[in-house]
Amino acid sequence: MDVTITPHRLEGSVTALPSKSMAHRLLILAALSQGITDFVCPSLSEDIRATLRCLKALGAPAMGTRDGLRMVPLTVGGVRHDARLDVGESGSTLRFLLPVAAALGQGATFVGHGRLAQRPLSPLDEQLEIHGVTLSERGRFPLAVSGTLEGGDFQLPGNVSSQFVSGLLMAAPLLADGARIAVSEPVESKGYIDLTVDALKAFGIHVDEHRETIDDHPVRVYQVPTGSRLVTPGLCTVEGDWSNAAFWLAAGALGPQPLSVTGLDQGSRQGDRAIMAALAMMGARMGRSSGIVAASRETLHGRDVDVSGIPDLVPPLAAVASVAQGTTRLAHAGRLRLKESDRLQTVSAALCALGGRARIEGDDLVIEGVNALGGGTVDAANDHRIAMMASICAAYATGPTTILGADCVSKSYPSFFDDFRALGGIAREEEA
């Protein structure tokens, strides 16, 4: 589906979606726990549906309820042998469930789509193999897993995906010997590991976290002791999603009228809560009250922002930078090359297609602000965050914009264009 957007300012209020990051974690832990868990989670993205599909294949089905979902754990029906797990295009689902499936020890085959096979599994795969797991050839699907994951000491560098650490942490309560995961410092995207620690705490698992020095190098150690058991809290409410809310706050920073997002926890451990500080640093006027964050435009200035720990904020920040005075450098963004698209390339290409000025310098995205974007045609490149970025840019362009393949927003935000229109946006859908 293509979408053509006619410029019209956005204003008003929108409710944050449930956090995709937290929903993945809580659903997986609920499937592994003792007891049924009910979830307050009013909407589901394609990535969350992928996790639910895989958990059902393992033997933990979820049923819809008035407020969200009810998860029946594996302890009820037993783990299925040689399950086929279709992760769709969800990197989180694959990286979280790979160690979990290995810990269950019943064999599994993962299949996926899009660019997912090209996204790295190293060094997680090496750690799994050191601890008793056999994997088929990487870089392609199907990916077969056999053997049973053994506990003990795991070692990971801190400059790789935090999802590797989170997957091992969620598998740890299943391991007879527990797990001690040493991550070299500095740890990128540590906030997402903190989310996993919080999710485990909700299910009765205390993760001991401390610093050590190994071979003269500082490491952060996460330890789940032997004998840990996951026990359901009975009810889980999935907090609001800062990653998707960031696009609406960026839209507020672009427009003359405030735009607010409700249902956000300002004390959340989600790393993308940093959108508030980043937009304020660029000159946006930010307001906050209990559960509500608002943004509106003041004089915007280009800034240097280190995005190594917040890579998903690059698209909304790039949208604001495109019309900020001066130059913005979104630094240390190399991990964007490994997303649903090569986001360094696709963010730059989208802004240039709309009349902006962007270039790539090494692992940095450099954006020279212009007075206004003109509109044009943007290829979303099957990347939900490119489609959303282009949409908020298009609302404030001087001419219409057509976004090719805009239906990819369903990966994380199926109702994005409904909310866009509710805020005053004009978007016409067309069959591709």
Image (tube, rainbow, N blue to C red):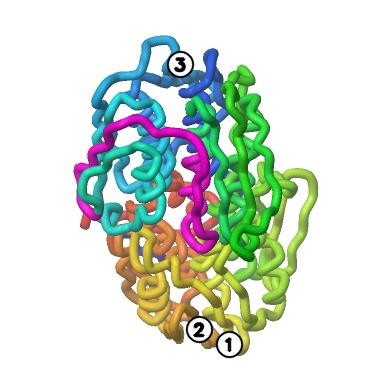
Asked if residue 173 lies left or right of residue 119, the reply is: right
Of residues 107 and 270, the one drawn nearer to the viewer in this rendering: 107
Residue of label 1: 327
Residue 208: which quarter of the image?
top right
Pinpoint residue 391: horizontal percent, then vertical percent. Answer: 44, 63
Instruction: Kindly identify the amino acid type of the residue bearing the numbered disc 2.
Output: Val
Residue 377 belongs to magenta span:
no
Helix, strand or loop for disc 1: strand
Q: Which residues are magenta?
A: 139-168
Pointers 3 and 1 in contact (C-beta within 8 Å): no
Pointers 1 and 2 in contact (C-beta within 8 Å): yes
The residue at 43%/67% (across/down) is 336
Helix, strand or loop for disc 3: loop
Instruction: Kindly identify the amino acid type of the residue bearing the numbered disc 3.
Output: Val
In three-dimensional space, the C-alpha distance between marks 3 and 1, rounded to whole angstroms, equals 52 Å
In three-dimensional space, the C-alpha distance between marks 2 and 3, rounded to whole angstroms, equals 48 Å
Instruction: Kindly identify the amino acid type of the residue bearing the numbered disc 1.
Output: Thr
Residue of label 3: 72
The residue at 61%/89% (across/down) is 326
Residue 143 belongs to magenta span:
yes
Helix, strand or loop for disc 2: strand
Packing grade of label 2 (10 A; few <14, some 14-19, many >=20) is many
Is 230 located above or below residue 387 in the figure?
above
